[in-house]
Image (spheres, helix red, strand yellow):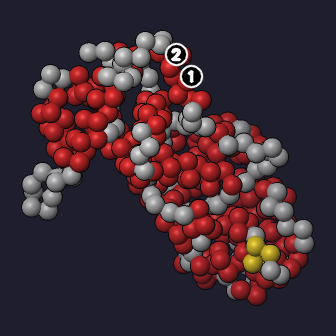
Amino acid sequence: MPLIDLKTLDLPDVRQIYKVHLMSKELSHNTVQTAISDAFYIWRKMDKQAFWDVLEANDFEQRGTDALGRILPKQKDGLPNKNISAYMSQLRRFRSFALSEYALDNEPTEKKVRKYRRKVKVVIPQPCPAEVEKYLQLWKKKKDYASQEAALDKLFFHLAPQNRDVADILLKVSTLNDFYSTNIFSVFPVAEHILALNIDERLAQGDPGLVDDIKTVNERSHYSFATKYCSHHKPLEYPIFDSYVQQILKHFRNQDGFCEFKDSELKEYSRFKQIILTFRKYYGLTQFNLKEIDQYLWQLGKTYYPNKYGAKK
């Protein structure tokens, strides 16, 4: 089986190579996204070795069907998942590519990978528990991040946990604006606006509509700031929106189709939170809370989509 060079690669590289191949066939966006998601289901849900064992097996059809039957959820009546044939179709298509068009290309593997990488802008490691843990450890090692978070926790949880005094609110708004460069040029109107909303009960309930109520002051939208203000009161209820997180969610939507959404929906907070929860479930990250997912997504975005200003969230 002439698959040895593909077998040396990690999943993101294999997916990107296959994606470019499918795009060259002028297939629709949805068809490409489905193909690059379903073809590697065994790899994602089992492991790399199991995937290649199935692909290289002489009884490929039976091995593939058996593997999918084990990992796809059963129907309510206990019968095998009726989507097995759809996943097999995509696995069969990739196998054909791996055994013919890619395998017959005589260029060295490293050169082929570089060529395919140039055709797609960004190659990001697939989200998985190990990747999240890696970035959480990186966060802890960065003294400025850890110290800043500790200062904000002290302010929001101990010194000024409520929002009944404009001085307390002003202190929190000013600190967030300074730490996160949220571009609020006049902080007092924002503090007055938050005071007038009487937000403490809604914060306690984790009301996502509160973000949308906070964000607009004097016809200016401070959406990212509003998510941060709520999150620092209730970090397990309010995921943070910023440009880095936005880029990562769009990237994996386009690559894997983990959730269908328009870019504009990320600016609707209830929908944004739903998308974050879908991301967490799709990639098997439910062991992590929303604060940890936020730290992971932000660092990932900062790494792969750096902006020229280098601003923090």
Q: Which residue is more in the foreground, 288 or 131? A: 131
Task: Tell me which corner region of the image, top left, top right, bottom left or bottom right, holds residue 278.
Answer: bottom left
* Circle 1 Cα neighbour tier, 10 Å, few/some/many (<14 / 14–19 / ≥20): few
Instruction: Count every numbered label the image shows and give the total.
Output: 2
Q: Quadrant of the C terminus?
A: bottom right
Relative to residue 116, is residue 289 depicted above or below?
below
**Residue 200, percent across and down?**
65, 80
Identify the residue at image location x=71%, y=64%. Answer: 224
User: From mark 1 to mark 2, how far is it between C-alphas?
Assistant: 6 Å
Task: Tell me which corner region of the image, top left, top right, bottom left or bottom right, holds residue 99.
Answer: top left
**Residue 255, percent across and down?**
48, 45
Q: Which residue is more in the foreground, 121 or 308? A: 121
Would residue 30 be found to the left or right of residue 96 on screen? Answer: right
Q: Quadrant of the N terminus?
A: top left
The residue that label 1 is drawn on is 114
Which amino acid type is shown beneath numbered disc 2? Answer: Glu
Relative to residue 128, is residue 116 depicted above or below?
above
Which amino acid type is shown beneath numbered disc 1? Answer: Arg
Asked if residue 158 shows in the view, the reply is no
